[in-house]
Image: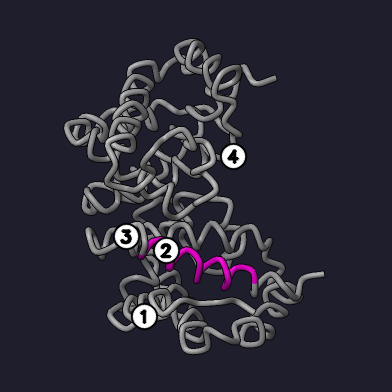
Amino acid sequence: MVEWTDFERATIQDIFSKMDYEVVGPAALSRCLIVYPWTQRYFGSFGNLYNAAAIMGNPNVAKHGTIILHGLERGVKNMDNMKEVYAELSVLHSEKLHVDPDNFKLLSDCLTIVVAAQLGKAFTGEVQAAFQKFMAVVVSSLGRQYH
Amino acid sequence: MTTLSAKDKEVVKAFWAKVSGKGEQIGTDAVARMLTVYPQTKTYFSHWKDQSPSSPSVRKHGITVMAGVGDAVTKIDDLKGGLLSLSELHAFTLRVDPANFKILSHNIMVVMAIMFPKDFTPEVHVAMDKFLAAVSLALAEKYR
């Protein structure tokens, strides 16, 4: 079981309660598709991903970015239970979507950068540590059902 | 991983021109964050009396690291050759596990995103990520 300090719990709740999912989600996903272009392999049906401008303006990317953030919210609401909460999604990503779990870390790093840019100085080292710990647990939970 | 394209080098040089004035601040914050977020990196600094984010040792080291990054920008056309002596230092004297270059690179970019949110666009991010990876590779060149 993951041990969370009071500071970590409060920090995660605070960050996500103030977040606009429809801004942060699309920003993080489009950044991931631009910075790590091989991740585009999973989005063949999304239409034009030809260059950065196309990616950032693509409505399918935006929609999916928001969906991802809502998925993260499940973890935020169940921090003591994340393995169980993400079991089904893990099976989906493994059996149906066939996503290499290394990609979860790439998206997580891009989300960290987007959140850092949003929060500015408020994204202190301690806040970053809490955020990255939360994301590491999400990433680990999502990779758990792979075989 | 890959070589830097002409466009990558252009983007890196342009962004560096914008931010190099704050180099010391970027370096200090990046090193401080690294020690906080990745506590295992503190093992390389057991000789420091004070490993806290506000310590003078952290600031001094942040300045050193960022000066190295700035130097690498000027040598962007031949990082392996240009960073040879730094590679020898890291290989034979410091013996920093190269995995840590990735960690520090990540924290440098987090600080860039915080300090220059409008300028650290996805295009700048990918060029910087490639550049720092190339620098890390050049630093590990002499390891074995």
Q: Residue at x 39, y 66 (%)?
A: A58
Q: Secondary structure at mark 3?
A: helix
Find residue B144 and report its image quarter: top right
- Which residue appears at 51% of the width and 12% of the height? B84
Where residue A111 is drawn, which disc sits there?
2
Question: In terms of secondary structure, where does tag 2 sit?
Answer: helix
Q: Give the chain letter at badge 3.
A: A
Pointer 1 or 2: first along the chain: 1
Q: Which residues are magenta?
A: A127-140
**What mark, if any, has residue B99 been given in the picture?**
4
Q: Which residue is mark 1?
A: A10
Q: Position of residue B14 (x, y in %)?
A: 25, 31
Tell me where residue B122 appears, x and y as whole percent. 36, 50
Q: Which circle's residue, 3 or 1, is located before the other in the chain?
A: 1
Instruction: Inspect the image, locate mark 2, and give the three-letter code of the amino acid beneath it.
Output: Leu
Quadrant occupied by the N terminus of chain A: bottom right
Dot 4 and dot 3 residues touching (CB under 8 Å): no
Q: Residues within 10 Å of mark 2 (few under 14, many from 20)?
A: many
Residue A137 belongs to the span the image colors magenta: yes
Q: Residues within 10 Å of mark 1 (few under 14, many from 20)?
A: few
Indicate which disc, 3 or 2, sits on the residue closer to the N terminus.
2
Disc 2 from disc 4: Cα separation: 21 Å
Question: Horizontal placement of A94 versus B136: left or right?
Answer: right
Which residue does the numbered mark 3 point to in the structure image? Answer: A116
**In the image, are marks 4 and 1 on the same chain?**
no
